[in-house]
Amino acid sequence: MKRQIYAAEHEAFRATVRTFLAKEVLPHYEQWEKDGIVSRDAWLAAGRQGLLGLAVPEEYGGGGTADFRYSAVLAEEFTRAGAPGLALGLHNDIIGPYLTTLGTDEQKRRWLPGFCTGDLITALAMTEPGAGSDLQGIRTTAADRGDHWLLNGSKTFISNGILADLVIVVARTTPEGGAKGLSLLVVERGAAGFERGRNLDKIGQKAQDTAELFFHDVRVPKENLLGELNCAFIHLMTHLAQERMSIAMAAIAGAEHLLEITTRYVKEREAFGRPLATLQHIRFEIAEMATECAVTRTFLDRCIVDHSNGELDAVHASMAKWWATELQKRTADRCLQLHGGYGYMTEFPVARAFTDGRIQTIYGGTTEIMKEIIGRSLLA
């Protein structure tokens, strides 16, 4: 089915993204995977190309557009290229809205220009060794010391953790407040007592630096409080729909790309003296995956348009995230199976997609959390 959500300007942007990937990312990606981190030069190149801060107002150097379809194009092209390590979606779609909607004028002037040029790489530090989806379990504390906050605690599984220059930290500012006692504090590179732990060794997305972060009596200036005091829970819930849409967009693009390369493979690969594509079981597998992708794509495209118009709610974003990521996981498994032994070789794109995509049903809220959100909305 022909997609109807993109106009000429979106396709022109897609061409720009593909050129950027071909020139600035793909020639270096194998080395980044070995290094466990991407080059800062790639972030600067993305800034020069206008790929950072798409929704940031132009006065701060951003693209000045709230049209989420541009973010969708970025997600699709980076996924098709097999290059999740350069986490532009995290920077633009997940962290960007916190700075643009919660930041004071002074904070915006201080941080957004670098955000858009790639000089300031960002991270969101929410997960802790003992607290993932359950925000009430957060133990990182920030004590009020008059002109500053004294931050203590640790975070783990933090994407961009090694490279980040700005880290939005979820910390407990009111001990007895439960989920309502949390605030967002921005910790800047070089702050005394802020240490980075291991660059964690993951099964996939090897080029994406994911780290442990430690805070030992870090003095965070009062002017680095982001949003309202003790309102982190509300702020986080407000922006989770876009985060989940960002993940869902990459997931359906990943499933479609897996289907594309596997369809091509079974046409070329022979077994028992004939192409795999002539076997009925293979045709059934391809037919099932193609239908699932087409149906999911239709729903996701509707969600993208609704979100661009400010009409997407948390429930439908959760549906999109759950369904698309689980589809990606199933499709990766089935496509690897159809590749046989070659599918297990890391030199084949299907093998890398299998491991790179496995995290999709976990971060941004697990599948189980998505189902709980949906179920509560229907049965409350």
Image (cartoon, rainbow, N blue to C red):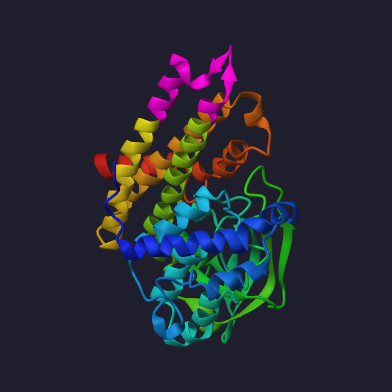
Q: Picture quarter containing residue 103? A: bottom left
- Residue 94's x, y, as percent? 46, 62
Viewer-proximal residue, 14 or 185?
Answer: 14
Q: Which one is nearer the viewer's eye here, 168 or 152?
A: 168
Name above or below for residue 305 compared with residue 352.
below
Identify the residue shown where x is 51% and y is 45%: 360
Residue pictured at 42% horizontal, 52% vertical: 244
Q: Quadrant of residue 195?
A: bottom right
Quadrant in which the C terminus appears: top left
- Residue 340 shown in magenta: no
Left or right for 294, reference 200:
left
**Residue span colored magenta:** 265-289
Position of residue 375 in the picture relative to residue 258 (left or right): left
Q: Position of residue 144 (x, y in %)?
A: 56, 78
Query: Is residue 278 magenta-colored?
Result: yes
Q: Nearer the viewer, residue 344 or 182?
A: 344
Instruction: Evaluate whether residue 278 shows in this view.
Output: yes
Numbered-mark total: 0
Percent x, y of residue 239: 39, 62
Q: Looking at the rendering, in which quadrant would you find the N terminus?
A: top left
Q: Horizontal placement of 373 versus 92: left or right?
A: left
Q: Eyeballing the image, is 219 above or below 82? A: below
At horizontal 61% and vertical 24% (from top left) the residue drawn is 340
Instruction: Say if 65 sits above or below 373 in the image.
Output: below
Q: Is residue 230 visible?
A: no
Residue drawn at x 46%, y 17% as measured from the top left: 278
Magenta-drawn stretch, dominant element (helix, strand or loop):
helix
In the image, residue 2 lies at what x, y percent?
29, 45
